[in-house]
Image (cartoon, rainbow, N blue to C red):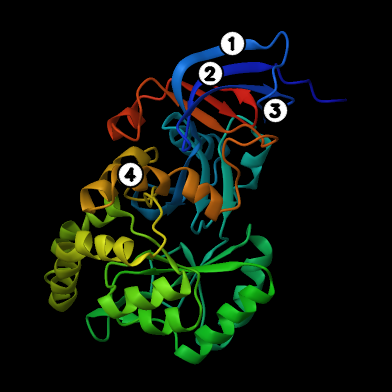
Amino acid sequence: MTASRLPDLHLSGVVLPAGEHRDLWVRDGRITFEPVPGAETVSRGGFLLPGLVDAHCHVGIGRGGVPVDDVPVLREQALAERDAGVLALRDCGSPVDTRALDEHPDLPRIIRAGRHLAAPRRYIPGLAIELSPGDLVDAVRVQARRGDGWVKLVGDWIDRGVGDLAPEWPADVLREAIAAAHEEGARVTAHTFGTDALPALIAAGIDCIEHGTGLTEELVGDMAVRRTAVVPTLVNVANFPGFAAAGETKFPAYASTIRRLHAGSGAVVRAAFDAGVPVFAGTDAGGGIDHGRIADEIRALHSAGLPAEAALAAGSWAARDWLGLPGIDEGAEADLVVYDTDPRADLDALARPQRMVLRGALVR
C-alpha cells in the first residue's frame, strides 16, 4: 500500500529569521518558494517561524519521576509539546522506549539520548542505568548506538556521604567515555547542578551541559573556546528553593548549595551568552515540569539577559541548526509555526500559535 500524498499548501507572511515577507508552498511535504498551482492557502499575513525546539525534555517520565510506558500517555506528553509549537524534542534521557511514537506523524520529532547513566544511588531511583566507573565506557557505547546521536550522563547529584552535590565520575573515565561516544558518532551531554563536576566534563570534551548553574567565569570561558553548549532549563531551576527546603533537615549543606545556585542562575546564563557559549532552550519537562512550557523557558532566557531575538533563536532556528534540523529553506521538510504578531518583538506571542505545519502536513 502506498502512502497518500500530502495536500499542497500555500502560506504567506514574514519568514523568520530573515524577516522578509514571502510566499511559500509545501509540496510533497517539502518547502518551495516556487508557486504550486492549486495549492490551498492556509495562512496569510502572519510570521512564519521554524518549528520550536524543546532541547531538554523527558517523554516517558511521569509525575514524581515515575517511568511511564503507556503509549496513550506518551502521546499525550508529546501532544502537549506540539500544541505549544514545539515540533522537535531532544529527549535527554528516558527510562522507556518511546520509538512507538515515531509511527505517529502528527507528533513532534524526537531526538533521543537513550537512558541516563549514573553511579549507584546517585540519581532519581528507577530512571538511570546505575553502574560503576569501570563499566561507563561500555555503557556509553551501548547508549550511543541506541540513541539518536546523543548520550546522557549524570555528572553530579547529592552524595549522601558528604551531604552535598559531588561529581559522579573520575576524570580519566570521563575522557574515555566521551571519546568512545564520539567514536560512535554521538554527542554527550551531562546533568550538572554544582561546580565540582564541571572541570573534568568540559576538559574531557563534552558537547553540552544541562542546567549548568555551577558554571564559573573560568569555566564559561573554556566552554566558549570549545563551543560547548549549555541548556539552562530555567523553568526547572525556579524549583531550586523547593528542592532546598525538602532536603534542609537531612542535608543542610546541600540545601545551602542549591539556594546559592538558584540565586546566581540568571547571572550564569548572562555570562555564558555574553562569552559566546551556545545557549539553547529546554524545559526539563517530565517529572516535576509540565510538558508544553517552551514559551516560559524562552521568556526566562530573555529575563536572564538574552536579547529577545536571541532567546527566540535558542528555541527555534539556532536550536534546529544545532540538532541538524532545517529551517524554512528550499527543499526542507516543512516544520513551521505561524503567529499573528512578531515573536521577535513580543515573546508572549509564542503562547498563541495560529497554524502549524509538521512534516509537511497542516496539524493546526
Viewport quadrant of the N terminus: top right
Tell me the crowding category of disc 1: few under 14, some 14 to 19, or many 20 or more residues within 10 angstroms, Cα based. Answer: few
- Residue at 27% x, 80% y: name it: 160
Amino acid bearing label 2: Ser
Pointer 2 residue: 12
Pointer 4 residue: 298
Marks 4, 1: nearer the viewer = 1
Work out whether mark 3 precedes mark 2 in sequence or the reverse, and give the earlier one.
2
Regarding residue 59, the answer to whether it shows in the image is: no
Work out whether mark 4 precedes mark 1 in sequence or the reverse, and give the earlier one.
1
Element on which disc 4 rests: helix
Q: Is residue 295 above or below residue 305?
A: above
Amino acid bearing label 4: Ile
Work out whether mark 4 precedes mark 2 in sequence or the reverse, and give the earlier one.
2
In the image: residue 321, left or right of residue 5: left
Pointer 1 residue: 41
Which of the two residues, 158 or 350, is positioned nearer the viewer here? Answer: 350
Element on which disc 2 rests: strand
Q: Is residue 58 above or below residue 308?
A: below
Work out whether mark 3 precedes mark 1 in sequence or the reverse, and give the earlier one.
3
Cβ–Cβ under 8 Å for marks 1 and 2: yes
Q: Is residue 237 above or below residue 27?
A: below
The image position of residue 96, as x and y in percent, is 56, 54
The image position of residue 81, as x and y in percent, is 45, 37
Tell me the crowding category of disc 2: few under 14, some 14 to 19, or many 20 or more residues within 10 angstroms, Cα based. Answer: some
In the image: residue 243, left or right of residue 1: left
Label disc, if present, on residue 29 of the rendered structure: 3
The image position of residue 224, as x and y in percent, is 40, 71
Most distant residue in the right direction: 1
Label disc, if present, on residue 300 of the rendered structure: none
Marks 3, 2: nearer the viewer = 2
